[in-house]
Image (cartoon, rainbow, N blue to C red):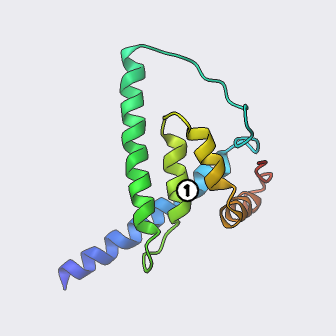
Amino acid sequence: MLLGLIGVVVFIVSFLVTTGLAVWFVVKLPADYFVQNNRKTAKRVSITHWVQFLLRNLVAAGLIALGIVLSLPGVPGQGLLTILLGVMVSDFPGKERLERKIASYPKVLETLNRLRARFSKPPLVM
């Protein structure tokens, strides 16, 4: 009984946290985030850069894994948006192309723009 209650609480909290993070991140994106050649890259080689790189990618891997779980049937949550969030936080070659591919799915783009409209933000430009 107690174990079941703990499971329900963890389920509800994780649903609320992932949904809240996904919404916050989507609302904060600039409307032209997915436009090709929009971003500048800078090369840094300090130790803090490598620590930041490692932490970002660990958080991203966790978000992607959580998004995969949330995408399973019967598990409520924003699975594809959480995966997209994980990809956006990560740092790897080809990231921009993968972001655009995920965000360009009609249902994903529609959901992203609906969230942005709810917070009076302009729609994303692809």
Q: Which residue is mark 1?
A: 22
In this rendered view, identify the residue nearer to me: 104 or 116. 104
Image spot of residue 115 (x, y percent): 69, 61
Relative vertical location of residue 5 with respect to residue 62 in this rendering, above or below: below
Instruction: Give me the residue at 41% from left, 28% from top.
Output: 52
Instruction: Give me the residue at 50% from left, 41% from top.
Output: 89
Residue 75 lies in what quarter of the image? bottom left
Image spot of residue 7 (x, y percent): 28, 75
Q: Is residue 77 visible?
A: yes
Q: Residues within 10 Å of mark 1 (few under 14, many from 20)?
A: many
Q: Is residue 21 visible?
A: no
Instruction: Give me the residue at 45% from left, 60% from top.
Output: 67
Instruction: Say what amino acid the circle numbered 1 marks.
Output: Ala
Screen quadrant of the N terminus:
bottom left
Image spot of residue 32 (x, y percent): 76, 41
User: What number of labels is visible?
Assistant: 1
